[in-house]
Amino acid sequence: MKYKSLSFLTLSLIIALIISCSSTKTEKEKIVKLTTSMGEIKIKLYNDTPGHRDNFIKLVKEKYYDSICFHRVINEFMIQAGDISTKVDIPEEIAENYSYTIPAEIKSHHFHKKGVIASARWGDLENPKRRSSGTQFYIVQGKQLTKENLDQLEKRVNASLKQGIFYKHLMGERKRNANEGGTMSDAEIQEFATIVAYDEINEMAPFVIPPDHRVVYDTLGGTPHLDMQYTVFGEVIEGIEIIDLIAAVETNERNKPLDDLLIIKARLVKK
């Protein structure tokens, strides 16, 4: 009887330990509050994009975003900030420290619904790995899209992706031809690029907007043509109406607000 009691006690302890280990608390998401010229925006940062989360928190703690401008604003599209050149009196040697990029963390379940925050980046030709800007980000405004809108958009995006593959090979063949002495005409280069690109285009995974994403784009809105192209790393949880106020300001031909539109300060929110 004593042996059986001891075994039962040991088994109970083992089960308790397993339950304790398996019920480890999920890491809480960090919250950042942007105090802007138009009002306050609270953003939660996703834990499954840790590189972007930690980089953004680092910049917030360094007060990098304090007194920086929204330098690119497009109504029914997005508002963009984080360019160090929009801060006053920044020495060139300091500005150079913020010209870095970070690896992409593109996730299919993070899509461009209204209110998400994502990293800006250079285009695919200069940046085929889609590395993110270390400092510049945008917050999506977008617009509501019907089923017909989304169907048409899928077709346009897929056509653009195919064109991008062809253009990549075209530029590559032009460069190769020039390096080898330029014996091919441009028409011959285009024909060869078409042949080389053919298999890659046929094997390309088509751009498809999932049904659950379609519901959100129809009701809340967003910019689905950016999906799987840029790293989305958080979303607005308070102050989403401030996005509309910022997006509505008057801008010049380069989409820069006519009057400075500031992030006055950015701070981590203590829980």
Image (cartoon, rainbow, N blue to C red):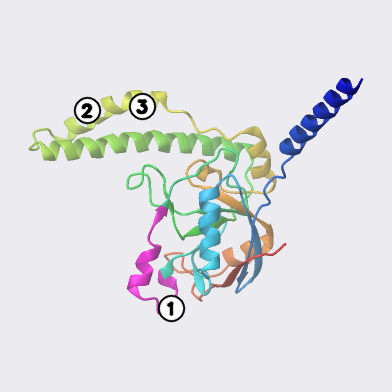
Badge 1 marks a residue whose secondary structure is: loop
Separation of residues labelled 3 and 2 (CA atoms): 14 Å
Query: Picture quarter containing residue 214?
Result: top right
Badge 3 marks a residue whose secondary structure is: helix
Q: Is residue 127 left or right of residue 240?
A: left
Q: Residue 167 location, x and y as percent? A: 30, 38
Q: Earlier in the sequence, mark 3 or mark 2?
A: 2
Please give the name of the residue rendered at 80% of the width and 34% of the height, measured from the top-left corner: 16
Please give the name of the residue rendered at 61% of the width and 68% of the height, measured from the top-left corner: 267
- Picture disc at residue 200: 3
Foreground of the two, 209 or 102? 102
| Residue 210 part of the magenta segment | no
Residue corresponding to mark 1: 88
Q: Is residue 74 visible?
A: no
Asked if the residue under mark 1 is in contact with the one under mark 2, i.e. CB atoms within 8 Å, the reply is: no
The stretch of residues the image draws in magenta is: 85-101
Give the vertical position of 85 relative to 52 (above or below): below
Check disc 3 and give the amino acid type. Glu
Q: Is residue 157 visible?
A: yes
- In the image as oriented, which residue stretches furthest toward the front? 2
Please give the name of the residue rendered at 12% of the width and 39% of the height, measured from the top-left corner: 179
Separation of residues labelled 2 and 1 (CA atoms): 50 Å
Q: Residue 149 location, x and y as percent? A: 58, 40
Q: Is residue 36 left or right of residue 8?
A: left
Residue corresponding to mark 2: 192
- In the image as oriented, which residue stretches furthest toward the right? 1
Q: Residue 109 location, x and y as percent? A: 60, 39
Q: Is residue 189 left or right of residue 84?
A: left
Q: Residue 92 location, x and y as percent? A: 33, 73
